Image (cartoon, rainbow, N blue to C red):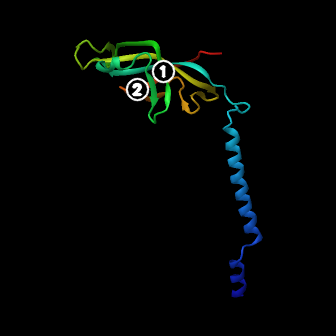
């Protein structure tokens, strides 16, 4: 009985050959699908890319860094992908700061009343981006989720900051 088991283990069976052929066919199908998908044709039902204006806010940034973001600056993601370009619409205002009074109520005040380098600013602006609307939000490019309320770390050549997305508006039809 031992000799029969040894004979079965030594040779390739028909089942082994079928499994190997199926694996090769699956890999070939995957390669063909990737090659066809890269020909520049948008698959049926895929979202259409267009130009959008993304309104954003950077809160409580040091006043000395407030001038580091201006129209024409290119915004990049943490991994170096281009997010978009800042448009003319950039405003720098003293940062809103909420402090608690003796009775536990929050009172709105603004940074900068004491002056100096310790003052903070809020920056609001708009970036021109290429993207598409999908069922679950808005994608910049094809892979950066940028829906209103979401915070993303972006940077320019001079500045890195957490940016809150306020609004996304389609520019081109």
Q: Position of residue 52 (x, y in %)?
A: 57, 19
Marking on residue 154: none
Residue 65, position as x, y percentages in the image: 32, 21
The residue that appears at 61% across and 25% down in the rendered structure is 132
Looking at the image, which is closer to me, 34 or 162?
A: 34
Residue 142 locus on image (x, y percent):
59, 32
- N-terminal-most mark, 2 or 1: 1
Front one among 99 and 95: 95
Element marked by disc 1: strand
Q: Is residue 119 at all visible to an observer of this figure?
A: yes
Which residue was labeled with disc 2? 156
Position of residue 9 in the picture relative to residue 59 (left or right)? right
Q: In which quadrant of the rendered view does residue 147 lie? A: top right
- Identify residue for label 1: 85
- At a point 59% along the width and 20% down the height, the residue shown is 51
- Say whether marks 2 and 1 touch (CB < 8 Å): no
Say which quadrant the C terminus sits in: top right
* Residue 90 image offset from top left, x and y in percent: 42, 13
Give the left or right position of residue 110, taking residue 53 as reference.
Answer: left
Is 166 or 171 nearer to us in this picture? 171
Which residue of the protein is positioned furthest toward the front in this rendering?
Answer: 39
């Amino acid at each position: 009985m031992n000799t029969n088991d040894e004979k079965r283990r030594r040779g390739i069976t028909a089942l082994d050959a079928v499994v190997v052929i199926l694996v090769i066919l699956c890999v070939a199908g995957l390669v063909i699908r990737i090659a066809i998908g890269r020909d520049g044709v948008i698959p049926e039902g895929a979202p259409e890319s267009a130009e959008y204006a993304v309104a954003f806010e950077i809160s409580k940034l040091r006043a000395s860094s407030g001038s580091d973001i201006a129209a024409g600056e290119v915004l990049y993601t943490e991994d170096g992908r281009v997010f978009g370009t800042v448009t003319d619409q950039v405003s720098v205002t003293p940062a809103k700061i909420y402090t608690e009074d003796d009775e536990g109520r929050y009172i709105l005040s603004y940074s900068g009343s004491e002056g100096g380098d310790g003052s903070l600013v809020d920056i609001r602006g708009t970036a021109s981006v290429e993207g598409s609307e999908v069922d679950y939000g808005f994608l910049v490019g094809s892979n950066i989720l940028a829906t209103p309320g979401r915070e993303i770390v972006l940077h320019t050549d001079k500045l890195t900051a957490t940016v809150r997305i306020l609004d996304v508006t389609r520019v081109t039809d």
